[in-house]
Image (tube, rainbow, N blue to C red):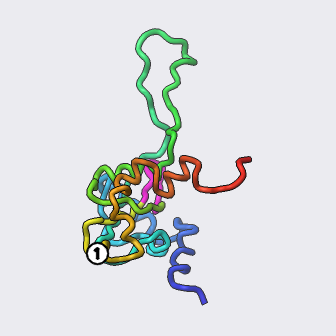
Amino acid sequence: MKSAYRQMEKQWKSPKDMESWKPMLIRWRREGTVTRAEKPTRIGRARELGYKAKQGFVIVRVKVPRGRRKTPKPAGGRRPKASGRFYPLGKSFQVVAEERAQRKYPNLRMLNSYWVGEDGINKWYECIMVDPHHGSIKSDKNINWIVSGKHKGRANRGLTSAGRKARGLRHKGKMG
């Protein structure tokens, strides 16, 4: 017998088959870049990453434009080879989403994030953020480590799971 969360996550293996997929993306396109959500879209994934349905936990949905980043056109004469203007970003879209959420909510701490959707133009990630000043967070022994001052700005310093992956710190072992 499979758990309810495992069944829900099984649907997310092929999300385009879900009937709510297209209307959901259309609704999200109209929203702002960083939007606070009532509850997680993928409850199973959120709980895996530390989310609890209690006060002090905040879910933020972030929209990140897809594609490579454009650099300014160089002034003055150049040969065409030297005027490359589209460069890949040195970090993942997920890291960019976490940084944007952190910038919008500086009083909250970034716990983790996960992918929730994409279309041809954008990618969406939901970030799990925690209020370190809330009493229920301070009294919860499983999450109160984040109250300490050294966990301020975790997303901007590459200390979340996605940030550590971008820095090459996700897996220990032989470099090959």
Residue 61, percent from left and from top: 36, 60
Q: Which residue reaches farthest bottom?
A: 1
Which residue is at a point 33% across and 64% down the rendered structure image?
147
Q: Assign a secondary structure to mark 1.
A: loop
Q: Quadrant of the N terminus?
A: bottom right
Q: Amino acid at mark 1?
A: Gln
Q: Position of residue 171 (x, y in %)?
A: 63, 56
Query: How far from the left and from the top, in percent, is residue 173?
Result: 69, 55
User: Which residue is drawn at the image coordinates 52% and 33% (left, top)?
Assistant: 87
Q: Which residues are magenta?
A: 116-125
| Crowd tier of the residue under label 1, counting other residues whose Cα lies within 10 Å: few below 14, some 14–19, many 20 or above | few
Q: Is residue 81 magenta?
A: no
Q: Nearer the viewer, residue 101 or 133?
A: 133
42 up-or-down from 71: above or below: below
In the picture shown, does residue 123 fall above or below 20?
above
Most extreme residue toward the right, as rendered?
A: 176
